[in-house]
Image (spheres, rainbow, N blue to C red):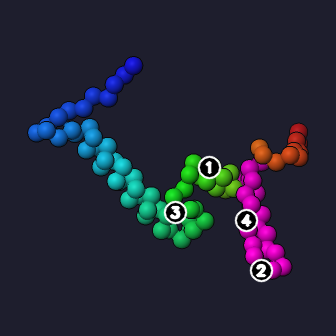
Amino acid sequence: MMEKESISKGGEDIGYKCSNVKKAKLQSTLAALLDDPILADVPRKPTLTDVDILTSLEFGSAIRISILKLDGTSFVIEMEQSKMRHRHISW
């Protein structure tokens, strides 16, 4: 089993500090990306499933169905091709 080595400098754990800096940079980059109007359909705190479905939608292996009911309410269903029952196989 490999353990993470950390270097101490003046009582500070540099490995931990470096990790926090990387995490802060990632959060900053993610926030900047989510502010882009092109990515308006991405949730503010996307899960891996959200990203997978959006990627599948982009590549055409998923569908998004928007349903508008007569009472004015609506909802959206996103489904990946692997979860659909009927499949068409072309040769």
Of mark 3 and mark 1, the one earlier in the sequence is: 3
Amino acid beneath label 1:
Thr
Q: Dot 4: within a 10 Å radius of its alpha carbon, few (fewer than 14), some, or many (20 or more) residues?
A: few
Of mark 2 and mark 1, the one earlier in the sequence is: 1
Residue 4 location (% of width, % of height): 32, 29
- Asked which quadrant contains residue 30, the reply is bottom left
Question: Which of pointers 2 and 1 indicates the residue nearer the eye?
Answer: 2
Say left or right for 65 vs 26: right
Amino acid beneath label 2:
Gly
Q: Secondary structure at mark 2?
A: loop
Q: Dot 2: within a 10 Å radius of its alpha carbon, few (fewer than 14), some, or many (20 or more) residues?
A: few
Q: Secondary structure at mark 1?
A: helix
Q: CA distance from mark 4 to mark 1?
A: 16 Å
Q: Secondary structure at mark 4?
A: strand
Between residues 89 and 30, which one lies in front from this camera angle?
30
Q: CA distance from mark 4 to mark 2?
A: 14 Å
Which residue does the numbered mark 1 point to in the structure image? 49
Span highlighted in magenta in the image: 59-81
Q: Are marks 4 and 2 in contact (CB under 8 Å)?
A: no
**Which mark is on residue 44?**
3
Q: CA distance from mark 2 to mark 1?
A: 28 Å
Residue farthest top in this picture: 1
Which residue does the numbered mark 4 point to in the structure image? 76
Q: Residue sitting at 88 percent across and 42 percent down?
A: 89
